[in-house]
Image: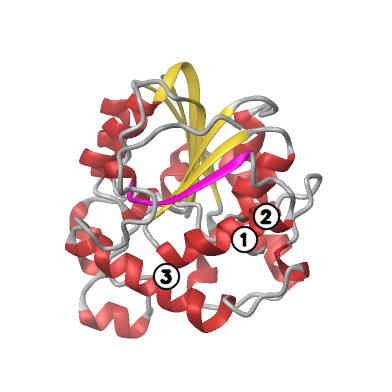
Amino acid sequence: MTRVEHAPGHAHDHGAGLTERQRIEAQVYDERVRASMAALTDDELRVDAAAIPFPNREHEEFLTFALGRLGEVAGARVLEVGCGAGALSVHLALRGARVTGIDVSAENVALAERRARVNGVGDRADFRAVPIEDVRDPDGTYDAIIGNQVLHHFELDVAMPNIRRLLRPGGKAVFCEPVLLLPDAVRQLRDTPFVKRALPKRVDTPTERSVSLGDVGIIRRTFPAVRLHPFHLLLRVQNFVELGDAAFERLAAVDRAILRWTPPLRRLSRFVVFEASA
């Protein structure tokens, strides 16, 4: 693989020049890798080209859909934004893509590099510890860009223009995101101490927040050709109650019917796949 040139010091310049929010995010994920993932064996790092590496069952439907919208990736230059420990990037490399994975966590990036070597795609997968806001690759470097649960960690007014700049004309970007598409007053109510005590939030970091109507506006202004595909409605209860597999599948089937036949309720979905074209 011919690696894309990037600004000196960006590959592993962990912590230098990070915003306060990025620093917090990096610290959380660095500590998580050191605590629970650093001891993974090579066998546990293996990825199957024929099986999407879902983080958990909640991701299966929308991540399968997102990859389907991305289309054939063999020979394509793909950027994964917020690659984490590299499972999806390696999966795409095994399918023939030339992948660059970026993440704010240096520990994640080190594990992703190891995963690529274990799976024999170290020559097709390049990983960097750098936030998307700071990626300085040339305009139109990538044929496709993907992210799973990442936009809600970013300052979108800075991140989205850079994402579009990096995508070649005619390229496609897909992002799977948790959303709360309600007026700001309702969102603020959700963050009051009383509501949070009654209905605790499930978050990975203290700085993340679900994508808002304002965030959707930023995405639409950056990518005029963008479609929103909703997923999970009643399954929002999974935020507060752990469902058994049978109950989860039943609610998922009901959700699919509701979201298909009742368009006004799509705004209440828990996840959205954003599909954007440059």
**Label 3, on which residue?**
29
For the record, the magenta segment spans 124-131
Q: Identify the element where label 1 is drawn.
A: helix
Q: Is residue 233 above or below residue 65?
A: below
Residue count near mark 3 (Cα–Cα under 10 Å), binned few <14, some 14–19, many ≥20? many
x and y percentages locating residue 214 in the rendered image: 23, 42
Residue pictured at 69% horizontal, 47% vertical:
91
Image check: 32 left or right of 47?
left
Give whichever of 268, 177 is nearer the camera.
177
Amino acid carrying label 2: it is: Arg
Q: Which mark is residue 117?
A: 2
The amino acid on which the numbered mark 3 sits, given as a three-letter code, is Tyr
Q: Is residue 227 above or below residue 117?
A: above
Residue 252's place in the image compared with 28, above or below, is above
As drawn, the residue found furthest toward the front would be: 8
The numbered mark at residue 31 is none
Is residue 112 magenta-colored?
no
